[in-house]
Amino acid sequence: MKNKFIEFQQHLYHDIEDEEKAEEYLDRTIPYIGLIVMYFNSLESDLDSVLCENFTDRTDSPGLIVLNKLNYSSKVDLLKRFCDDFQLGIGQFLNGYEQIITNLNECGRLRNMVVHADWQATDSDGYTYIKLKMSKKGMQQEYVQFTEESMEKITSLIIKTRHELYEFWEHRNDVLYGREPASQ
């Protein structure tokens, strides 16, 4: 995905020269937004299940009470803290630990970018307004070019991460129950 920045002038304004071409672009992109939301929600649900298992494997109730008001990034942080404590306790590292945490965080970042984008502020080249960045240099409007290819990559990463979360958790349980070593 390509980014571009436009210096903020006096009003938050998005220059869309060819609205018909922008509309055609959006027609092709909208199904990807839905897929990203759908697969991400499944990933978050799987993350909830993994976290609930940390409390007890008899019922999800205690875990769901804890997770009830947590946002996605807080849940990833909670998984990280549980895994850090587990690894410290066994004195070994779990295979795939750092990668799964990285991928979970990246899925959340990309999902937020897609879901919170101002899709009506998309130009004919597919650049969509994301946010206003403020720095010592002033304010800049940030745009990201969501192509069909980039949207497919986001969807694929979410699906891959969901599968890897399951594999990671199976590995963690195998280590916990002595069926395999933590690091090879």
Image: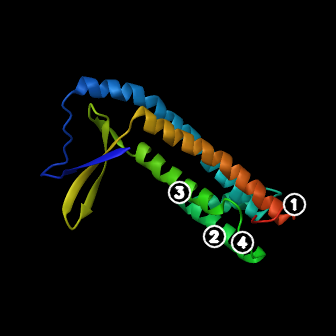
CA distance separating discs 1 and 2: 23 Å
Q: Quadrant of residue 51 in the image?
A: bottom right
Q: Are marks 3 and 2 in contact (CB under 8 Å)?
A: no
Amino acid carrying label 2: it is Arg
Around disc 2, counting alpha carbons within 10 Å, would you say few (fewer than 14), some (14 to 19), or many (20 or more)? few
Query: Which residue is disc 1 drawn over?
Result: 179
Residue found at x 77% / y 57%: 171
Q: Are marks 4 and 3 in contact (CB under 8 Å)?
A: no
Locate the N terminus and report the quarter of the image it occupies: top left
Q: Quadrant of residue 62 in the image?
A: bottom right
Q: Secondary structure at mark 1?
A: loop
Q: Secondary structure at mark 3?
A: helix
Residue found at x 23% / y 27%: 19
Around disc 3, counting alpha carbons within 10 Å, would you say few (fewer than 14), some (14 to 19), or many (20 or more)? some
Q: Secondary structure at mark 4?
A: helix
Q: Position of residue 6 (x, y in %)?
A: 20, 49
Amino acid carrying label 4: it is Gln
Q: Quadrant of residue 126 in the image?
A: top left
Q: Nearer the viewer, residue 175 or 50?
A: 175
CA distance separating discs 3 and 1: 29 Å
Query: Which residue is disc 2 drawn over?
Result: 81
CA distance separating discs 3 and 2: 14 Å
Query: Which residue is disc 3 drawn over?
Result: 105
Residue found at x 53% / y 57%: 105
